[in-house]
Structures are given as C-alpha cells and as structure tokens.
Image: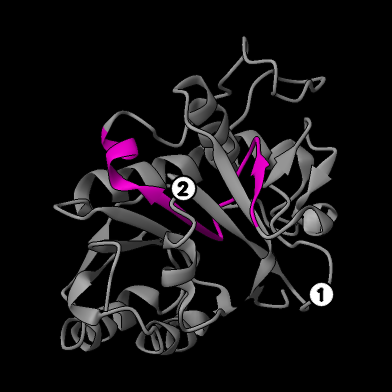
C-alpha cells in the first residue's frame, strides 16, 4: 500500500468526557496504517471527568498506534455562565485561548511526522479512509466539509472564501477540491513542514494588511483557524476545501 507518510492526529480537549468513547472508537476505525499514525491530546481547564478518563484512553491508543501522548496545560479560562460559547462579545477571548491551546499542543507533540491532522473531539463520524482521501489531494492544507446532517449546510463556518460570503456548502457545485481563504479546525490536514516553517494559530487578530480578511466593527484581522488561513496566504500557501467530502459533527 502506498502511503503519504507519518500522520500526527492532534486534538485539544476541554470538558470532553461524553465524547471520548466515540472519538477513540472512530480512530480505531481508520484504515490508514496504524504504525504510521501518532496521536497527541492536550487537556485544558476541564471540570468534568476528562482528566480522569484520558490516561486509560491513551493506554488504549498506545496499544494500537505508533505513538499516543497526553498533555495538560491550563489557561484558567471559563465561559461566563448562562452565555452561549458563540456569543459575539466572547469570541476574541475564547478563540485566543483556543489558538494558544492548539499551539501548545503542536509544539509539544510534533516529532518526526510528515503531516498533522487536526481533529476536534466532537466530530463523531467520518469515512474510514479519510486520511487517504485528504492526502490524495496532494495539497499542503486541506479541509473536509463538517456538517451536522449529511447533505446539509456546513457546521464549520470558519472555512470560507470571499471574506466569508461563501462556505463549503455553497461550493459543492464547483467540484471536489476548491480553493478557500480560511479554514476551520474540526478536521484539517496540514503538511507538517508548513507548521515547522512558522504556520501557527494566531491568538490575536492577524492579517490587517491582507486583502482577504473580513472587516468587523470591533477588530481587524482573523483569529485562530481563520487566522491560520490568512497566515498561510501570507506565506504563499493556498488552503483547499473538499465540499463533497463530508464529516459529521455532534448535534450540539
């Protein structure tokens, strides 16, 4: 079997206890050679059973995959009570912490791998050959279409083009592989050397001089995964989306 090299799956987690079994079972269902797959998890600021459950899950993964590691780093951030996580006024602080979490995990877990696959813990279903299909594009950065319901609108609206006018569900008719300006992190494949060259998740509004950013009333620039997309553009690396390759997010 021809492969694309070693793959590191990275997942930041917080209060993820209810998703852990589904997450681990889906990893075991991957068809990519397990001796080429490593897994890194960063747990931050959980108040549920996630920290207690992770050591057992990591032992499970270590018995099957090339490498599995579990890190902790606490940022001391909690969402205000009785406010949804997507409330507009919370986004700069919330996504800044998400970006820092991803960057901490990347710096601690990346070793000799050729690719990094970012995977959110609440992605509940994807094709067993998802890694092969993403690698087959030959692109440095590629993002499948994360949905709640197959054939429906995109759940991960951080993947967009034309300053957020078009999301992956809008681009299905363009084909199976389309250029995009921004990416989300529900599932995202990045060539490891692009990360090594300096591509990170900005924890501050990034890209003021880039013509592709969106203009908002309260800040200029993009954060976290969207900031990564703009930073990739500044580095001369094109991001790509796969509108017709769907993965499923938890309903909530």
Figure disc tally: 2
Choose between 90 and 126: the one closer to the eye.
126
Marking on residue 139: 2
Choose between 218 and 130: the one closer to the eye.
130
Residue, x 23% and y 88% (percent of image)? 60
Q: Name the element at disc 1.
A: loop
Measured as percent of width and height from the top left, residue 20 is found at 44, 82
* Residue neighbourhood size for the residue with mark 1, other residues' Cα within 10 Å, grouped as few (<14), some (14–19), many (≥20): few
Magenta segment: 177-196
Where is residue 225, by image quadrant? top right
The type of colouring in the image is one colour
Q: Is residue 128 left or right of residue 150?
A: left
Q: Name the element at disc 2.
A: loop
Measured as percent of width and height from the top left, residue 165 is found at 85, 38
Choose between 237 and 137: the one closer to the eye.
137
Q: Is residue 122 left or right of residue 128?
A: right
Inter-mark Cα distance, 2 to 1? 24 Å
Q: Is residue 239 above or below residue 69?
A: above
Q: Is residue 128 above or below residue 79?
A: below
Task: Confirm whether the magenta stretch covers residue 54.
Answer: no
Q: Is residue 50 left or right of residue 178?
A: left
Residue holding disc 1:
151
Residue 230 can be seen in this image: yes
Measured as percent of width and height from the top left, residue 251 is found at 72, 78
Residue, x 58% and y 18% (percent of image)? 207
Measured as percent of width and height from the top left, residue 42 is found at 32, 59
Choose between 164 and 45: the one closer to the eye.
164
Q: Name the quadrant of the C terminus.
A: bottom right
Residue, x 49% and y 30% (percent of image)? 232
* Residue neighbourhood size for the residue with mark 2, other residues' Cα within 10 Å, grouped as few (<14), some (14–19), many (≥20): some
Q: Is residue 89 above or below residue 141?
A: above
Q: Is residue 33 left or right of residue 66?
A: right
């Amino acid at each position: 079997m021809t492969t694309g090299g070693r793959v590191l799956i990275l997942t930041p987690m917080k209060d993820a206890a209810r998703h852990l079994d589904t997450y681990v079972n889906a990893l075991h269902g991957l068809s990519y050679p397990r001796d080429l797959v490593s897994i890194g998890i960063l747990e931050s600021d959980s108040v549920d059973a996630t920290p207690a459950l992770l050591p057992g899950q990591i032992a499970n993964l270590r018995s099957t995959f090339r490498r599995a590691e579990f890190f902790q780093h606490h940022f001391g951030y909690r969402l205000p009570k009785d406010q949804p996580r997507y409330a507009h006024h919370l986004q700069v602080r919330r996504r800044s912490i998400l970006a820092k979490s991803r960057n901490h995990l990347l710096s601690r877990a990346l070793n000799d791998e050729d690719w990094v696959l970012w995977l959110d813990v609440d992605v509940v279903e994807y094709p067993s050959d998802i890694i092969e299909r993403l690698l087959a594009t030959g692109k440095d950065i590629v993002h499948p279409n994360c949905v709640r319901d197959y054939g429906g609108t995109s759940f991960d609206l951080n993947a967009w083009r034309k300053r957020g006018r078009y999301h992956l569900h809008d681009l299905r008719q363009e084909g199976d592989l389309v250029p995009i300006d921004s990416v989300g992190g529900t599932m995202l494949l990045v060539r490891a050397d692009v990360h090594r060259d300096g591509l990170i998740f900005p924890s501050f509004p990034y890209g003021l001089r880039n013509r592709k950013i969106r203009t908002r009333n309260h800040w200029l620039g993009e954060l976290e995964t969207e900031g990564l997309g703009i930073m990739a553009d500044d580095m001369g690396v094109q991001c790509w989306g796969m509108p017709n390759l769907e993965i499923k997010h938890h309903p909530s």
